[in-house]
Structure formats: structure tokens, C-alpha cells
């Protein structure tokens, strides 16, 4: 079967660091992507991990441990504009690259 | 390139009517995906094309749903005999084979069935 868990809501202060965890069970797991979605907007790609370890892209970093079926997204120097929903999306199946989204984590950044 | 575009952005229809949505992917992208998203949920995979071939369909895609990508460029998603449960945001995404780990999403078509 397939399952995906991430916290439903997180609140953090502007300028702080926040970590959004993701655990997954995905048959044919290929890699883990992260997407950001503002209210009323389209999901936008943030990061992708195919191998274990940390990937850094500016203020955002993403980590993957394939043996633990676990990953996280780290957001540094939080800005108000980072208030959005964040989805971890395991990619299933080399070939179709089908993204599987969970319910996402709603991040609220407060002053 | 203007990105992935979807038309219409909003559609209100009466239950039982047929609706058709269009998606124009980024021009060089040969993979195209349809997703459905309801309030408070993440996008749910519906179907996927590589060029003009529909390679995978979700169990969510009932017989009332059909998607085409006749020339390997734009795609249409048709819903026949709409039901209130079809009310959702329908998202299209595209990617380039070999760089599929990054999908580009359109703004979506919001369908309301009354």
C-alpha cells in the first residue's frame, strides 16, 4: 500500500527556521519532491531528492533517508511570503514519474 | 514561454451536464499530467500522457472521465454527466522526459457543479 504523513499545520516566527517532516510508504519509490502552494495558486516545485542526504537550494533544503522512508524540508530565514502549504510528493515508478501528494502542511509565518 | 496554461479558469455547470477543460503544456514538454484537488487536500493523480499516448489512469478516473492529447501538444479532459462530487480544482502539469522530477503546474480550472 501507500501512505504519506506530514504535520497538518506549523506556525513559525519570521526569521526563524522550520522543519517539515514527511514519512512515506510508496511502492516503487523513486525519489521525493517538495512543492509549495499558496492559497489559490498552483503547486510550484521546490526541491527533489533521489539519493540520501541533503539538497540545498537557497533558503530551502531537503533531506532524504531512503532506509527510513523519511524526509524533511528545512526553511531558513522565514519570510511572510513563505506562508503556504507544503507538500512532500514521493515519485513512484521509474517511467511514469507519478507524483503522489498528501494533504500537505500549512505553514503560517507570524511577525 | 508562458508556462502551463489552462482554460477555462472557472466553470460552473449544472449536474448532469458535460464539461471539457483544456491544458496547454510548456511547448517542449512531452509529458502531461492531470490532477484533481479538493479543498484542504493535496492534488490527486488522474492520468498521464507521454506525447499522445495515455500511459496511466488512476482508479479515481471513472468512465465519465476521458482525457485526450491528440497531437502530443495540448490536452483535454472531459467529464460527462457531471455530479456534485466532481466539484474540485483540476490541475494540469507538464514535464520534460529526462527532467521529470520537476513538474510545472498550471493555475487550474475550478469546477463547481450545482
Image (tube, helix red, strand yellow):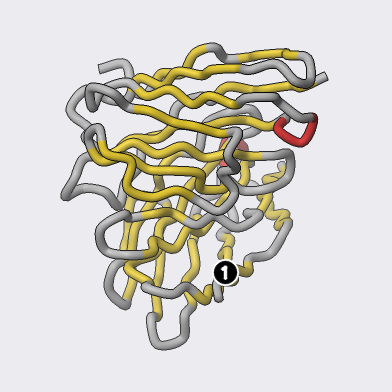
Instruction: Give the side of residue A49 with respect to residue B111, left or right.
Output: left
Looking at the image, which residue is at 57% across and 50% down?
Answer: A86
Image height check: is B94 above or below B57? above
Tell me which corner region of the image, top left, top right, bottom left or bottom right, holds residue B26. top left
The quarter in which the C terminus of chain B is drawn is top right
Image height check: is A85 above or below B34? below
Residue lying furthest right = B114
The quarter in which the N terminus of chain B is drawn is top left
Closest to the observer: B37 or B71? Answer: B71
Tell me which corner region of the image, top left, top right, bottom left or bottom right, holds residue B25. top left
Per the image, the residue denoted by label 1 is A21
Tell me which corner region of the image, top left, top right, bottom left or bottom right, holds residue A6. bottom right
Instruction: Give the side of residue B53 with respect to residue A79, left or right.
Output: left
**Which chain does the numbered disc 1 sit on?**
A
Where does residue B100 sit, x and y in percent of width and height?
26, 49
Looking at the image, which residue is at 55% across and 76% down?
Answer: A1
Where does residue B60 sit, x and y in percent of width and height?
59, 49
Looking at the image, which residue is at 68% across and 50% down?
Answer: A106
Amino acid at each position: 500500500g501507500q501512505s504519506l504523513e506530514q504535520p497538518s499545520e506549523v506556525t513559525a516566527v519570521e526569521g526563524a527556521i522550520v522543519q517539515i517532516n514527511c514519512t512515506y510508504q510508496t511502492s516503487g519509490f523513486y525519489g521525493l519532491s517538495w512543492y509549495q502552494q499558496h492559497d489559490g495558486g498552483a503547486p510550484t516545485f521546490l526541491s527533489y531528492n533521489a539519493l540520501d542526504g541533503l539538497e540545498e537550494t537557497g533558503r530551502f533544503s531537503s533531506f532524504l533517508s531512503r532506509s527510513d522512508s523519511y524526509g524533511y524540508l528545512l526553511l531558513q530565514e522565514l519570510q511572510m511570503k513563505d506562508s503556504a502549504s507544503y507538500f512532500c510528493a514521493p515519485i513512484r515508478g521509474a517511467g511514469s514519474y507519478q507524483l503522489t501528494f498528501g494533504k500537505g502542511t500549512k505553514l503560517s509565518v507570524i511577525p | 514561454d508562458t508556462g502551463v496554461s489552462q482554460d477555462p479558469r472557472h466553470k460552473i455547470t449544472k449536474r448532469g451536464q458535460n464539461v471539457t477543460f483544456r491544458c496547454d503544456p510548456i511547448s517542449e514538454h512531452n509529458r502531461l499530467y492531470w490532477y484533481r484537488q479538493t479543498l484542504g487536500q493535496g492534488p490527486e493523480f488522474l492520468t498521464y500522457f507521454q506525447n499522445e499516448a495515455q500511459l496511466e489512469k488512476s482508479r479515481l478516473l471513472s468512465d465519465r472521465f476521458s482525457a485526450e492529447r491528440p497531437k502530443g501538444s495540448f490536452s483535454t479532459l472531459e467529464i460527462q454527466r457531471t455530479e456534485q462530487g466532481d466539484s474540485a480544482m483540476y490541475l494540469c502539469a507538464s514535464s520534460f522526459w529526462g527532467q521529470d522530477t520537476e513538474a510545472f503546474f498550471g493555475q487550474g480550472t475550478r469546477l463547481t457543479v450545482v
